[in-house]
Each structure stands twice: as structure tokens, then as C-alpha cells.
Image (spheres, helix red, strand yellow):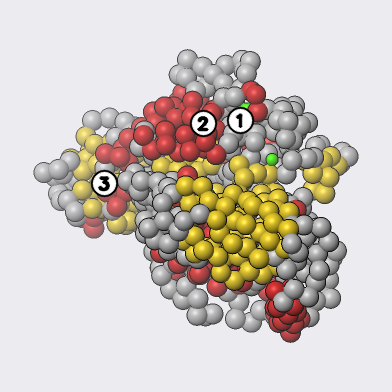
């Protein structure tokens, strides 16, 4: 992470001047002051298609090309007309408003670009809307999300591994190269996911990523070793926000994946980025507007990662700006959401992907490094078109006050309600790791849940035990399979929508990035075994897989685990009991996190369970039935184990 703070930009005043000069250059160019040399050329149209009857109309279309100075744009074909046209100072980008008549028929159209006596035409499509039934559904607490790194899960098509568009990036011996996983591989494994019991998948960004070795973001492969170039196998280095990464497949294959997932009752969550681009995006050296990024490649702030400054009433403008406008690792061009064209571009891009593919929800990257007013406008635009699509925001921080500050339902001191539906429960993540991996007090988990009062809606948060950005659970000091199963029992019975990271059902180990992104055994050609099958898994892997599968089935069977209130009915250093209560259904989740057996006694009456009621342990740690006597429950649990006690309906 760099630390070269560059205090050369002048804040609000210089940004306002920047906007004025942008406006002036548009006006001058619109008046035809600059004379282009050669005829106009169009290299890229963004978006390449839009819909009639959409909540955004006109759509702002951005053309990238050459010699666009003084260009005029006309629509060719029925139901389409163009509005205001603006061109950047280099004549390399043209923005045009395209109005689509509500009754315009889907099909191919063209945009005719004319300048200095010369004309070119470029395709633009009025797309046929996808049927809404079974798409754009949003996820709820009825779901269990499974997170897949497409490159590391399953290689279903070896023809795209060393792709002609970007040769030389495939090498399974290197942790930061492509390993061959793709959309076809995920399609092949959908029945496996269904069998595990998950109901939604989140996959890393599918945008077209850097086509070459990245010589700017370099890392040593071993500690102290030489720094080597990397690839964007992880999906977070977009060079084209309207393209599909060729290592994964193409738009057709992506749609097939989403359609086949939907056919099996699995929702699909798209991962999106609005904060930054690859350092190799064409915009890095040819900006569509002068203020497209915060700063330039040569002159920008470096991110200070001080996320808390977004809610700090005392923060200095300089500190806050570095967190919002600073470039990640001093390298990744940081999109300027204060620029109206950037804002429009990003909002339309989100809606285009949803409409093109039929995704059910959006996972949004790096929430606290983008101005909150952008999230408000962006989430409103999603809701205006797709009422049920929800947004899972990533705010990588363990402070529940900061997480709560970004959740929909309450304006912050800046007067802004971000409209972000839910967030990863990073606060709970740290407590779960401390208690169940490191063996520290289980009380920590209850202490985090005590902060639920801070959230506008804690019931929809997303508990998890790990993702791709930290070492895996099994690599924590003190981690055991028993501890992993306790952690899984907790997130699968806690309020919210649980999220599983691929491989955690196999107790997969893995240190820091990229070791935490190992290939799924059996997903790749010539793998020695196939852990997608029972016979291909080890005894330990089957133990963990079966445990998660059982938890998923219990969650599906017991509405109290999905929608019930949460009560903390017993507190001790290493023993804790939560009740989930919904109507007449009560479920007690009893944890003994100690390394020796423990007898736990708690009052069941607070959770509306009457004297004499029978409780059955659905995890079968306790045999037979447990009776409520004198309003109390008494149970002896072995070391590091949990029970899910379900009160039998009277
Ligand atoms: Ca492949
Ligand atoms: Ca690519
Ligand atoms: Ca930013």
C-alpha cells in the first residue's frame, strides 16, 4: 500500500473549475470550433443496447472513437431519436442522449455519426426485455448464498484457458494466474450446489478484465522473493464494463448459466464495481471527460483506507478525500462519481447487466470508498426498474456502528440514506473467528449481536465465516474441524442470510491471498480426486459437507431459523444459547465452545416454551428427548459441540 500523499489538488474549488472548463469545452466543440482531421471513427458503444419502456429514457450513450470533434449523431430506424450531443476535448468520446419510444419494436438500429463531411454508422440495439417471472427476485433470509470464484471452481471448457484475446495468462502453477474455471464449469456443478442445499450463488465480477500481464500491481510469490506480474483472474480489474471476461465464457454462456440456475431454483447475485478500473482500462490514458477519475495517472491521491472517516463528524476534508478519492494501492484509477457523466455511466451499467442477464441481486464492492450520495442515487435507480432486486454491500470493517451507518432505512448526519439493503456482517465475522476458530470466549458472539440496535434492519444482514479477502477459517491459529462446524452451525441459525465460501464445505485450508483461493478438487482436468462426489471426498470432508447439508435442510424446514426473533437465553464464558422464535415454533441453538463437556441449564419460559414440553436435538448430539422441567432445560454437551433443540408442537 503506497503512502505518497499528494496535496496538489485544490479540493472543491478546483473541482468546480474542472466542471466549468469541461462545460466550456463541450460548448466550444458543439459549436464546431475545433476542426477534426480525417473522418469520424467509432470503436465502442456503451451501452450497446437499451429497452423501450425503461425507467431510464433517454439513455446516455457514450461512443469511443477518433475524430469525433463537431460530430452530429442521428438515429437510423424506427422508434429512436437522438438528443443532446457532447464531445470531449480530444474528440475521442462522444455522449449522446438516445430517446426510445415506448412502443418501439425490439431489433437492430444504427447510430449515424457525421463530422466534417464524412459519416459512419454504428450498431445500436433496442433489446427485447427478458420475462420478469423467475428473474430479478432479490434474495431474502429464506436463502443460503454460496460464493464462487469462477476461475478456481470448475473448468468446464478448456478451449478458453489460454485465450487468443489474452494469451499467456493461464498457468495453474502460479497463484495469481488464470486456472481455467469458467461459466460452463459452474453450470456443470449446479446439481452439486442444489444437493448441498444452497439457494443462491454469488460469483466474482464477470466484466472483461485486463488482457495482459499486470506489471503495475506486482507481488512476491514467496515472502521476500522477487515481485512478479499478476493477472485479473479474480475479476476486479475491468477493462470493459460492457464486456464478458473471455476466460469465463461469453454473454450467451453467462445467460445460460443464470437461466439454468433459475431452472433449479437457484438465484444469482452479480458482483459489481463502481469504485475503480484496471490500470489498463483505455480510460486511464484517454479520459472521456477531464474529471472522469479523481486525479490522473500522474497526479492522484493514494487511498488511506480510513473508512471510518465517512461517518466522522470531526473528519478533516483532506482525510476524508483520501478515503473517497485516493487510488487503491496507489495504482487503480478511481472513478469520480461527482462527475455527472460517470454517475450516469455507472447507473446505466448496473441496469444494463441486470436487464441483459436477469440477475436477482447485486453485490457491490468497496462501499465506503465511494461518495454516499452516489449510493443513494444508484440504489434508487435500481428500485425504480426492479423493485425486488436488492443490494449486498461490502464494507470490510468490524465496527457495527460504521456498518449500520451505510444500511438503508436511516439518513446519516450527511442527510443521506444510502439505500443499500444489506451488508456483510463483518462485525460478527471477527467474533465468530475469535470464538470458534481461536477458541476464545463464545460470549463475543452475543456481544456483537447486542449491537443490532444500531442497524435500521439487522434481520437481513449476511453472516459468514470467510470470503476471498482473508485467510480461510481452517488457517486460523487453533482452528479445528469441530470449531468449523460450530461456526457453520452458528451462521446457519443466526438472523440474516448466511453466506458460504466455496471449499468451506470441505474444510479447505488456505492462507492469505491467493492461497485462500485454491482450486476446488475435482473441478479441473486430471485432478487426482473429485470432491464434488461423496466417494471423492475424504472422511473429514464428508463429515463437514454432511453437516452443512443437514443445516441447510433444517433451515429450509424450520421457518423460525429464517424469520424468527432472536433471544439470548443463556450466557457463560464458553456456553451460549440462542432461541429463534416464530409463532408457536421455538428452536434453541445450544453451543458448548469449551474443550471439555459442559452441562448447560437455561430458562425456557422466556422463549414461550411451557413446562413439560419435549425438545428434540436435530443435530443428534443429545440422544432421545429433553424435557422442560420447572420451566428449565438441562443438557450436557460434549466438548466443542452444538445442539439444535426443537420444541415439539403441542
Ligand atoms: Ca476453462
Ligand atoms: Ca479479458
Ligand atoms: Ca473512490
SS type, badge 1: loop
Image coords of residue 425 (percent x, y): 49, 55
Q: Are marks 1 and 2 in contact (CB under 8 Å)?
A: yes
Q: Earlier in the sequence, mark 1 or mark 2?
A: 1
User: Local crowd at mark 3 within 10 Å, few (<14), some, or many (≥20)?
Assistant: some
Image coords of residue 190 (percent x, y): 44, 30
Foreground pick, 80 / 214: 80
Residue of label 2: 186
**Which residue appears farthest toward the right when viewing the image?**
226
Residue 280 lies left or right of residue 446; in this view the side is: right
Foreground pick, 419 / 446: 419
Whole-angstrom CA distance, mark 2 to mark 3, is 29 Å
Residue 644 lies left or right of residue 271; in this view the side is: left
Foreground pick, 513 / 343: 343
Image coords of residue 148 (percent x, y): 54, 38
Residue of label 3: 559
- Asked whether mark 1 lies closer than 8 Å to ligand 1, one says yes
Residue 24, can we see it?
A: yes
User: Local crowd at mark 2 within 10 Å, few (<14), some, or many (≥20)?
Assistant: many
Residue of label 1: 181
Residue shown at the point (39%, 31%) measured from the top left = 194
Instruction: Judge depth for marks 1 and 3 and give the one in front.
Output: 1
| Residue 541 in the image: above or below residue 384 | above
Q: Earlier in the sequence, mark 1 or mark 3?
A: 1
Amino acid at each position: 500500500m503506497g503512502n505518497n500523499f499528494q496535496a496538489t489538488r485544490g479540493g472543491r474549488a478546483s473541482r468546480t473549475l474542472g466542471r466549468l472548463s469541461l462545460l466550456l469545452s463541450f460548448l466550444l466543440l458543439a459549436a464546431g470550433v475545433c476542426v477534426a482531421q480525417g473522418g469520424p471513427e467509432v470503436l465502442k458503444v456503451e451501452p450497446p443496447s437499451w429497452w423501450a419502456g425503461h425507467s431510464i429514457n433517454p439513455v446516455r450513450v457514450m461512443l469511443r472513437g477518433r475524430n469525433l470533434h463537431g460530430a452530429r449523431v442521428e438515429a437510423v430506424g424506427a422508434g429512436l431519436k437522438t438528443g443532446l450531443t457532447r464531445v470531449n476535448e480530444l474528440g475521442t468520446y462522444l455522449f449522446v442522449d438516445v430517446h426510445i419510444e415506448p412502443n418501439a419494436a425490439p431489433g437492430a438500429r444504427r447510430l449515424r455519426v457525421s463530422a466534417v463531411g464524412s459519416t459512419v454508422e454504428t450498431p445500436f440495439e433496442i433489446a427485447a426485455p427478458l420475462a420478469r417471472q423467475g428473474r430479478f427476485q432479490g434474495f431474502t433470509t429464506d436463502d443460503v448464498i454460496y460464493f464462487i470464484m469462477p476461475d478456481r471452481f470448475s473448468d468446464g471448457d478448456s478451449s478458453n484457458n489460454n485465450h487468443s484475446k489474452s494469451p499467456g495468462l493461464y498457468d495453474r502453477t502460479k497463484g495469481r494466474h488464470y486456472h481455467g474455471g469458467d461459466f460452463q464449469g459452474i453450470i456443470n456443478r449446479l446439481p452439486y450446489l442444489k444437493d448441498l442445499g444452497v439457494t443462491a450463488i454469488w460469483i466474482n465480477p464477470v466484466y472483461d478484465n485486463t488482457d495482459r500481464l499486470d506489471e503495475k500491481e506486482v507481488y512476491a510469490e514467496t515472502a521476500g522473493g522477487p515481485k512478479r506480474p499478476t493477472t485479473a483472474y479474480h475479476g476486479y480489474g475491468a477493462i470493459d464494463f460492457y464486456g464478458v471476461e473471455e476466460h469465463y465464457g461469453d454473454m450467451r454462456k453467462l445467460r445460460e448459466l443464470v437461466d439454468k440456475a433459475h431452472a433449479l431454483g437457484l438465484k444469482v447475485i452479480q458482483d459489481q464495481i463502481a469504485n475503480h478500473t484496471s490500470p489498463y482500462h483505455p480510460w486511464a490514458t484517454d479520459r472521456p471527460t477531464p474529471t472522469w477519475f479523481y486525479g490522473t495517472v500522474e497526479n492522484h491521491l493514494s487511498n488511506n483506507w480510513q473508512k471510518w472517516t465517512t461517518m466522522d463528524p470531526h473528519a478533516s476534508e483532506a482525510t476524508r478525500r483520501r478515503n473517497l478519492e485516493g487510488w487503491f494501492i496507489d495504482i487503480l484509477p478511481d472513478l469520480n462519481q461527482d462527475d455527472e457523466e460517470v454517475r450516469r455511466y455507472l447507473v446505466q451499467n448496473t441496469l444494463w447487466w441486470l436487464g441483459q442477464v436477469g440477475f436477482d441481486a447485486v453485490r457491490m464492492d468497496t462501499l465506503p470508498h465511494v461518495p454516499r450520495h452516489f449510493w443513494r442515487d444508484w440504489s434508487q435507480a435500481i428500485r425504480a426498474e426492479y423493485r425486488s432486486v436488492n443490494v449486498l454491500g461490502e464494507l470490510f470493517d468490524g465496527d457495527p456502528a460504521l456498518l449500520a451507518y451505510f444500511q438503508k432505512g436511516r439518513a446519516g448526519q450527511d442527510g443521506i440514506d444510502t439505500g443499500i439493503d444489506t451488508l456483510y456482517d463483518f462485525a460478527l465475522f471477527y467474533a465468530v473467528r475469535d470464538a470458534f476458530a481461536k477458541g476464545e470466549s463464545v460470549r463475543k458472539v452475543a456481544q456483537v449481536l447486542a449491537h443490532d440496535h444500531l442497524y435500521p434492519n439487522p434481520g437481513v444482514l449476511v453472516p459468514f465465516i470467510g470470503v476471498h479477502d482473508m485467510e480461510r477459517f481452517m488457517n486460523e491459529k487453533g482452528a479445528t474441524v469441530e470449531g468449523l462446524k460450530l461456526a457453520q452451525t452458528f451462521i446457519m441459525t443466526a438472523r440474516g442470510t448466511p453466506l458460504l465460501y466455496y471449499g468451506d464445505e470441505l474444510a479447505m485450508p488456505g492462507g492469505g491471498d491467493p492461497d485462500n483461493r485454491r482450486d476446488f478438487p475435482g473441478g479441473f482436468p486430471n485432478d487426482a480426486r473429485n470432491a464434488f462426489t461423496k466417494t471423492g471426498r475424504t472422511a473429514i470432508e464428508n463429515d463437514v459437507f454432511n453437516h452443512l447439508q443437514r443445516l441447510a435442510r433444517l433451515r429450509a424446514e424450520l421457518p423460525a431459523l429464517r424469520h424468527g426473533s432472536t433471544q439470548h437465553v443463556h450466557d457463560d464464558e464458553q456456553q451460549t444459547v440462542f432461541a429463534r422464535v416464530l409463532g408457536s415454533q421455538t428452536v434453541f441453538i445450544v453451543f458448548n465452545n469449551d474443550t471439555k463437556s459442559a452441562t448447560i441449564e437455561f430458562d425456557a419460559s422466556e422463549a414461550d416454551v411451557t413446562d413439560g414440553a419435549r425438545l428434540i436435538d436435530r443435530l443428534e448430539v443429545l440422544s432421545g428427548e429433553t424435557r422442560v422441567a420447572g420451566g428449565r432445560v438441562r443438557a450436557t454437551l460434549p466438548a466443542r459441540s452444538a445442539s439444535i433443540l426443537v420444541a415439539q408442537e403441542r
